[in-house]
Image (cartoon, rainbow, N blue to C red):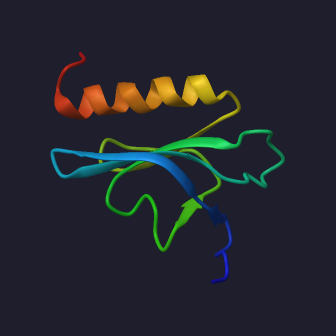
Amino acid sequence: MDNLCGTTKAHVFESTEINGTPIYFGSGVNPVNSPAQYFVAWGKEALVGGLIHTYNTKSPEQGAEWFVDEDEAEAKYIKIQKLLAGCLL
């Protein structure tokens, strides 16, 4: 499969679904002159065909954020889960 412009292959470590919204935590190669390699993504179209956007996008319905630090990415994954579950103000 070819990578579309602005996407990279996603290697998902963990995924969950809360209130119908899938959430992903994983890694990939972010070729946009950045050392970021870990991501958190959410929304039904966040990963399409195993590919993820190589840039940060954020909306309540869908998004993807890239991180250099794995622990920081994992903390964001947990925070997004809590937000979608309505447990965090």
Answer left or right for 59 relative to 7. Answer: left
Q: Quadrant of the C terminus?
A: top left
Query: Can you give x and y, in whole percent of width and height, for residue 61 in the image?
Result: 30, 48
Rendered view: 31 above or below 57: below
Q: Is residue 74 above or below residue 7?
A: above
**Residue displayed at 58% across by 23% down:** 72
State the residue lying farthest toward the front. 13
Q: Name the spot of residue 45 as percent of width and height, x first.
A: 38, 63
Is 33 located above or below residue 7 in the figure?
above
* Side of 24 relative to 12 (left or right): left
Q: Tell me what residue is drawn at x 24 percent, y 34 percent.
A: 84
Judged from this view, the residue extending furthest toward the bottom is: 1
Residue placed farthest to the right in the image?
33
Q: Position of residue 57 (x, y in %)?
A: 51, 47
The N terminus, quarter of image: bottom right
Q: Nearer the viewer, residue 53 or 72?
A: 72
* Count of marks placed on residues: 0
Q: Position of residue 6 (x, y in %)?
A: 67, 64
